[in-house]
Image (cartoon, coloured by chain):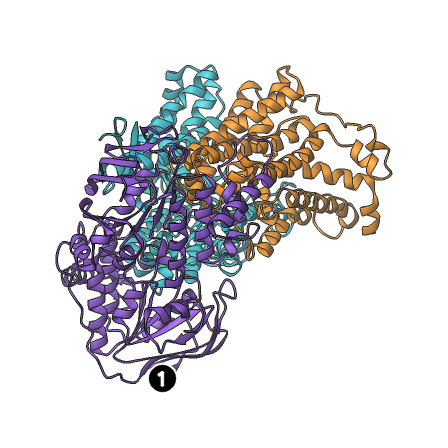
Amino acid sequence: MMKNTRVLSLENISKRFGSVVANNSVNIDLYRGEVLALLGENGAGKTTLMNMLFGHYIPDSGSIDVLSYEGQMEPLTLGHPQASLDAGIGMVHQHFTLAENLSVLENILLGSEKIWAWRHNRSNARDKITKIMNRTGLSAPLDEEVGKLTVGERQRVEILKALYQEVKILVLDEPTAVLTPQEADTLFENITAMTKDGLSVIFISHKLREVLAFSNRIAVLRHGKKVGEIPTSEANERVIARMMVGEETIENPRKKMKIGSPVLQLNGVSSKGDSTRTSLNRTNLTIHKHEIVGVAGVSGNGQSVLAKLISGLAEPDSGELLIDGKNIKYFSPKEMQSLGVGRIPEDRHHDGVISAMSVAENLIIERLHDKDVNNKGFLQNKSIKKNAEELIEKYDIRGPGIDANTALLSGGNIQKLILARVFECMPNVILANQPTRGLDLGAANEVARRLLEARTRGAGILLISEDLDEILELSDRIMVIHDGSLTEAIDVSREAIGLMMAGEKA
Amino acid sequence: MIRIEPREMPSKWWTIGIPIISAFVAILLASIPLTLAGANIFEAYRQMANGIFGSTFAFTEMLTRATPLIFTGLAATIAFRAKLWNIGAEGQLYLGAMAAVAVGTGLIDAPAFILIPIILLAGALSGAIGMAAPTYLKTRFGADEVVTTLLLNFIVIIFLQMMLEGPLKDPMGMGWPQSEPIVDNGVLPQLLPRMRIHAGLIIALLTAGLVHLFLSKSIWGFKIRAVGENPSAALHAGINVKRTFMGAAVVSGAIAGLAGVSEVAGLRGYLTTDLSPGFGYTGIVVAMLAGLSPIGVVISAIFIASIFVGADTMSRAIGVSSYLADLVVALSLICVLIGGFIARYKFIRTNKGNV
Amino acid sequence: MDILQILLTESFWAATLRIATPLIFGVLGALICEKAGVLNLGIEGIFVAGAMAGWMAVWFGFSLWTGLLVAIFVGGFFGLIHAILTVPLGLSQHVSGLGVTMLATSVSYFTYRTALPKVSSPPKIEPFQPFDVPFLSELPFIGPILSQQTAMTWLAILMVGLVWWVFNRTPLGLSIRAVGDNPDAVDAQGLSVYGIRIGSIIVGSSIMALGGAFLTMSAFDSFFFGMVNGRGWICIALVIFASWRPGKALLGAILFGAFDAFQVRLQTEVGAFLPSQVFLMAPYVLSIIALVIVARRAEYPRALLKPWFKGAR
């Protein structure tokens, strides 16, 4: 390859948060027109590094140089997104930074005009954006309220935002987490086209396959350090996996099991969501003992309503829901729990634990009327403590102690706490909603292991996940959810499921 | 450049020290308006202290003044722990007082040990309804309880005027809008001869103890704390959030109602429209200053009562407006807020870009 | 009792506008703060402060318009306190607002009482006079109503238009609307979340203070304790009723003013049958009912009440 111009240089970047080292002396270079993949498991420090590039954080030490418009490498003013934008750096965050009450055009305009101007210049902006949309093939309805768009559309708005600001360097944080396999392909096609125009791209990912498919070069981070860099042409899955994790990955074999009687049934269930797209429409689903049923699909297609129903937080508008053959008339989380439904919520901080309360308290929060917790209305502190000590041992929950605020635990340990709470009750039905999202490989493995154990024991598990690999690995049967309809996937290849996720026939 | 990071665990010393420091900072800051009003600062502070510690009478006056504040402080504490913003304690206090007067001015003829509990119960019930209604509107319709409880205060006070000019009016009152006096059997006994301090204080202290017990050791208290910290996680875990809110509302309103009973049946003897100079609102400051701790409320109420009583004395002695007390109370609230922030976060000085 | 007759009298509508004016200022001010994501419960106290400060400036010899500037400044000052507590420090917006109300009220009362020792009747100033707009006052029916209004009422109406323009036609308004929905979106575009929020709170509070100033400098001519009487809280309810839109805010304030003016007239008609207090309660009851009706479908600014810290991701 011809010697290319360097456009970005991160030198010896370090950052720590309290006692946690997020980045340790990381060096990254980026060349014009290339796609660099930043690979690492969750928690490796990829997002933190890019956040510093974009000015959300200030590195503790190190420097960043960017190629200026005059062709010189100049130091970047750190800690200000405006400075990064001025230097031509744009970022598409993993959690979209869009104002849902504003239109697409307004979101793109935001921050791009002088704030004290007496009025907008919308027609100019409209022209410019339309040109960009034509050139790149990315389109979005300019006057539609962002709140009404699908996840895929919102991502396109994010990219258009950056292109409108005329960025030369574009950072994408886990861009395919919310896309179907086909949409991911299209995205990278568009990106490749843009690199021909001189755009340089860094994309963050923890997925080996897509990193190999879509990048020119791969930089691997592990525990905050850069442990390797390799041109994609020379890389293969085993090599980069080893760099990413540092050791051989543990496999969780899924033994074939004979399924038992149905533990969860949805018969013709309809339930309203925020829009027709997110509502469930005459859904049928059956889960048996000793079975894991995976629900694949891009988020925003009815998963929340499905999860809410099984958690007891919503009622079906029509149809029936049966647990162990019993028709449920009264829906509440407490009712579901008492019927043996264990729930691992999607948002562990918001719905899973109460951060201001202690580990011990969070462990018994679903058992407030059990004899060992509740004595005539009063808390049994001694047995609550004992329970906590046993469970943190058994589930390897690491943190400052049973009386420490749960807020101090890492994401992985919070998930282990939730697992402890759910699995100790020996549930018959388990709802696992995005159970490994944001977890590092070790913790993710732990979750998978416990789910498989529960399956062996006899539970029926509903696994909702955006991670298609996880679904393929753990599920006995796969359903695909799209526009509120659940369909069983007969052809379980990636291709076929990907098409079903987008609503097309395989 | 200063960077802010949350502390690992809020230091115990800070948690107790902050309210105390805030209180003193507020008193010190009072010197500014005092000076601007042309007063001699030392004389002013001396008179304030005199008003609290100058004599037994002064001291018991302070405790008498603290009694309703303990009740309203506890009412705010329970509600705020559930993040239920009860700003209506003022109205609930009056509802309690009205119930006390409706029941205790001759409607029932019974010995004290029966009549007093009845009056207390009536007051508590009345106050409870006063908070239950807005909370019901919140759980059923999503109507923000801050606004509804605030507006209800005004409604209750107008209702009080109506009652005092109508059904509750004292025919022997020479035309003034006031109620008949509470019958002798219904009056809360005096605690010391020739002092105004009354049994309401004992009831208040008992209530504080009970609230502490229930909040920290009971399942019900656990639910209130859980719902206050994270209602969605609490809901997800099977806690009935609506019922918890209603429970907190009923108890909070009831205790605020008891404040009204205490003032009418223990101190004044009859009800007028100026029974409460804002005890309900001050109770909020009492609760915040106490860090939402029931035992802390007792101490905080005593402190705030001291400010008011001291300011009254100072005002009479050197002629400075007694609104200074309200100023100090407001400053204490703001100081304790800022103090709480300092306790939860630590400040790290960094050089540009480097640790 | 002829309702239609009451509705057709000029004095009724003139009274309506007069009652609505402080509410217009208050709702606009609260709306600006909340659109930016911060609830400002300091409104009641800021009303008192605006009323006292503006009045006192005139009492000490300054012009009415200078008095308004003083009120604006005082409102902005208390708004700044609330802004610092809630934005960079991220403290409870409820508690901070209540604290500011208590502080502003007590400072105002203390200052007034210290500057003017107890007198038998409250001292007066020369307030804003009714303002004759040359062309408009010739219009039938509307003309006499409008010419009974003072400059401050015109100011309030103009302010509705100004706020609407800023929100919907300027980049500044766009960033305020954005910051109340998703501060991360604003931050990622290089704008200062803290700056926009603090600025909005200060401006909103300044406008709130004008509402208070209207009471002492236009509707009446003296300051007395307890004169605000819950108007601030009513404005907080009306903001929700107005769906955080300036046009609807004007409508809501006028509707409320009409109702209040109506109940006063109703009292004179029906006063024999119902005690006056029932009518006095009516505005507050109405506010609660209005709140309950819209609460279910109210689309609160998404980021309202949620503190945002720079660098916390």
Q: Quadrant of residue A24?
A: top left
Q: Quadrant of residue A8?
A: top left
Rendered colour, chain C: orange
Q: Position of residue C193 (x, y in %)?
A: 44, 37
User: The chain shown in cyan is which?
Assistant: B
Secondary structure beneath label 1: loop
Which colour is chain A painted? purple
Number of residues whose C-alpha sits closer than 10 Å to that of mark 1, classed few (under 14), some (14–19) or many (20 or more): few
Query: Residue C269's x, y, as percent?
Result: 79, 48
Residue receiving disc 1: A325
The quadrant in which the N terminus of chain B is found is top left
In the image, taking residue C305 as reference, residue A387 lies left or right, namely left
Residue B270 shows in the view:
no
Vertical placement of residue A256 versus B350, above or below? below
Q: Residue at point 43% right, 66% down? A: A502
The residue lying toward the viewer, choosing from A17 and A147, is A147
Which residue is outermost to the front?
A2
